[in-house]
């Protein structure tokens, strides 16, 4: 399986270094090329030399702004993809996938079910697809440039585009739910109402500025999600037990009744 990994970044350059390290060190099942697309250099956020040594780096001269920047990065990155890739893995710099077994599983599902896109469901109430990690058919992304031209509701607008074209897509249950169900928010209130550690990935998406220990704390959480010492950081907990705890939390979240189970999904941003 040949894939190009398209990583977009503005100012999370410390995260970017770890994201690329994970790909180089831990992704072993495929043939990957790494393309980093940045719009932060003009704002004082250069891409580290360690990344430039192992990846193609495209630095855009200006940032289109918070709302348009994400679409800008994706569209400019797609325009520079290599011709040899079968799949494109879309990643935000702060999304660390600690093993590529999930990519192997997802691409198999895509072939079997004739999907052109796979990612987590972003919001249960709407037709929506997460963009922090997605696996996409390279052929699709080259021939449908409008797919990544979105406005204020990108996760919904991508799903709406695929539905409008009659193209098959699917969700990645190992990375769901993304948002904490209302019934659980009384005792799970961290990280803006979102889950950010997914042991079945294993993947972590924490914003380091929200962690008291910064990047080192994120590495500890990553070790717990993986159930093994991916990073050399001190941790008093048992990693296997911590992974099991995170897996139980996710299992409960999937089973907690939610209002979207009983309502038709709505269309947002169409």
Image (cartoon, rainbow, N blue to C red):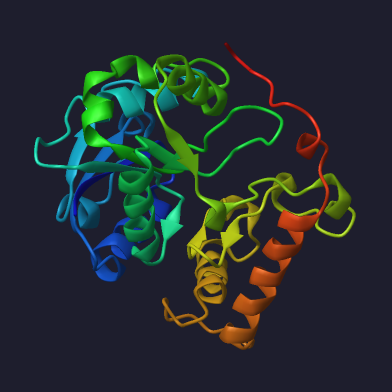
At 65% from the left and 62% from the top, the residue drawn is: 212
Foreground pick, 160 / 60? 160
- Could one spot residue 45 in this view of the protein? no
At 64% from the left and 53% from the top, the residue drawn is: 210
At 39% from the left and 36% from the top, the residue drawn is: 117
Q: Is residue 46 above or below residue 155?
A: below
Provide residue 266's location: percent of width, then percent of height: 69, 21
Provide residue 83's location: percent of width, then percent of height: 9, 35
**Numbered circles on residues, count:** 0
In the shown orientation, is residue 195 left or right of residue 96?
right
Q: Residue furthest top?
A: 270
- Could one spot residue 152 in this view of the protein? yes
In the shown orientation, is residue 267 left or right of residue 208?
right
Q: Is residue 82 above or below residue 182?
A: above
Foreground pick, 150 / 266? 266
Foreground pick, 104 / 11? 104
| Figure quadrant of the N terminus | bottom left
Provide residue 13's location: percent of width, then percent of height: 38, 48
Q: Is residue 220 above or below residue 178?
A: below
At 77% from the left and 39% from the top, the residue drawn is: 261
In the shown orientation, is residue 73 left or right of residue 203?
left
Q: Is residue 184 above or below residue 243?
A: above
Provide residue 182's location: percent of width, then percent of height: 84, 45
Foreground pick, 31 / 264? 264
Quadrant of residue 36 within the rendered picture: top left
| Figure quadrant of the C terminus | top right
């Amino acid at each position: 399986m040949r894939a190009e990994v398209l990583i977009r970044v503005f100012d999370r350059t410390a995260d970017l270094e770890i994201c690329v390290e994970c790909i180089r060190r831990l992704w072993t099942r495929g043939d990957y090329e790494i393309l980093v697309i940045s719009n932060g250099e003009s704002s004082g956020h250069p891409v580290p030399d360690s990344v430039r040594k192992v990846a193609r780096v495209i630095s855009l001269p200006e940032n289109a702004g918070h709302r348009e920047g994400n679409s800008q990065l994706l569209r400019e990155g797609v325009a520079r993809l290599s011709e040899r890739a079968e799949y494109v893995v879309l990643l935000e710099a702060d999304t660390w996938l600690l093993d590529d077994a999930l990519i192997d599983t997802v691409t198999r599902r895509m072939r079997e079910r004739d999907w052109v896109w796979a990612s987590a469901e972003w919001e249960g109430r709407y037709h929506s697809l997460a963009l922090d990690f997605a696996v996409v058919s390279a052929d699709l992304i080259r021939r449908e440039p409008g797919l990544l031209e979105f406005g204020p509701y990108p996760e919904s607008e991508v799903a709406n585009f695929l539905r409008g074209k009659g193209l098959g897509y699917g969700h990645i249950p190992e990375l769901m739910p993304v948002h904490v169900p209302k019934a659980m928010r009384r005792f799970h209130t961290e990280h803006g109402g979102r889950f950010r550690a997914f042991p079945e990935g294993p993947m972590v998406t924490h914003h380091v500025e929200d962690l008291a220990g910064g990047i080192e704390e994120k590495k500890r959480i990553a070790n717990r999600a993986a159930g093994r010492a991916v990073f050399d950081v001190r941790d008093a907990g048992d990693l296997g037990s911590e992974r099991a705890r995170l897996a139980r939390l996710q299992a409960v979240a999937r089973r907690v009744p939610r209002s979207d189970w009983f309502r038709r999904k709505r269309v947002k941003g169409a």
